[in-house]
Amino acid sequence: MSGDQSARASRAVLVGGAAVCAGVVVAGEPLRGWLLVALIVAATGAAAVATRRNPSRQNPAWCILLGAALLVPAYVLWYPAKLRWGLELGNPAITDGFFLAGYVAFLVALTRLIRVRGSVDRRIHLLDSLIISVGLGVLVWVLFIAPYLHDEELSGAATVVAVSYTVVDLLLFGAVVRLLVQGGIASTGDRLLTGWVVAQLSADLLYSVTSMRGTFELSGLTPVLYSASFVLLGAAILHPSTLAVGPGHRAERPMS
């Protein structure tokens, strides 16, 4: 697949995904939940295409593919088993293992991308990204992690899992900040990657808040944010500028 074909494929994912996200907003149950599942399956397919484009084991797309593939059974179990049929999955549940493993795979992918794009100013870039990430981390700790630590109804294992979600999200955010500090957001691929992680972080934090308050609803904003994150992930992994490396990796044709 040429660079132009990849850019067109990325654009098609954005347009088609936006239409499906609109469906998530207006659809009733059970269609809404299954549209959410369909989007993560589509993101997995996009990652598979990116691995075929460059079958090297060093290609970060392999880790994206693994992470997305792990999220598929997580959402399939989480949606029908827990939200639709009211089955008790436990706390922590088997789905937590899939979710966290998928997030770790995403983190490894971004770390690989940072490494292959490396620059002579690595220490400065790392310091800048740490400053931004720590600032956000303090805010998230106060607002989201501390309540888990003081929740006497949660078991030790459940508390660790709940905190782990936020920590991994922050690490993902830090990795994206590192990419941006290295080269800015001149490339479409990096803008899509940033949008993906921001949407994912926002969805996870919103889900945490509504779960703690007992107000989570599948008809709320959280599934829409998750849906948007999967669309952005699929579009990012297909865009030729995302996995390009070296000094010229920002050179690209505009998407429009």
Image (tube, grey):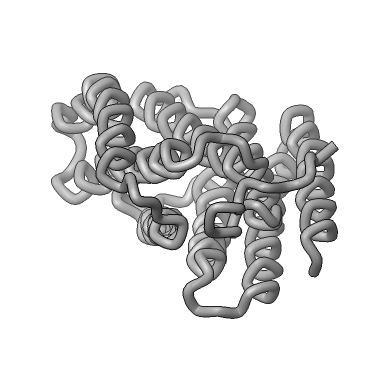
Corner quadrant of residue 144: top left
Corner quadrant of residue 150: top left
Instruction: Choose between 61 and 184: the one closer to the eye.
Output: 184
Q: Is residue 38 left or right of residue 196?
A: right
Position of 22 relative to 159 (above/below): above
Corner quadrant of residue 20: top right
Instruction: Choose between 118 and 175: the one closer to the eye.
Output: 118
Position of 189 relative to 76 (above/below): above
Where residue 167 appears, x then y in whole percent?
28, 41
Res. 104 visible in picture: yes
Where residue 76 appears, x then y in whole percent?
58, 57
Where residue 123 appears, x then y in whole percent?
25, 44
Residue at figure coordinates x 58%, y 43% from the top left: 190
Instruction: Choose between 128 and 192: the one closer to the eye.
Output: 128
Residue at figure coordinates x 39%, y 51% from the top left: 119
Residue at figure coordinates x 60%, y 58% from the top left: 244
From the image, which quarter does the C terminus lie in? Answer: top right
Q: Is residue 148 left or right of residue 61?
A: left
Residue at figure coordinates x 49%, y 40% from the top left: 183
Q: Is residue 228 left or right of residue 208?
A: right
Res. 80 visible in picture: no
Instruction: Choose between 11 and 227: the one closer to the eye.
Output: 11
Position of 62 relative to 57 (above/below): above
Where residue 233 appears, x then y in whole percent?
61, 49
Q: How many marks?
A: 0
From the image, which quarter does the N terminus lie in? Answer: bottom right
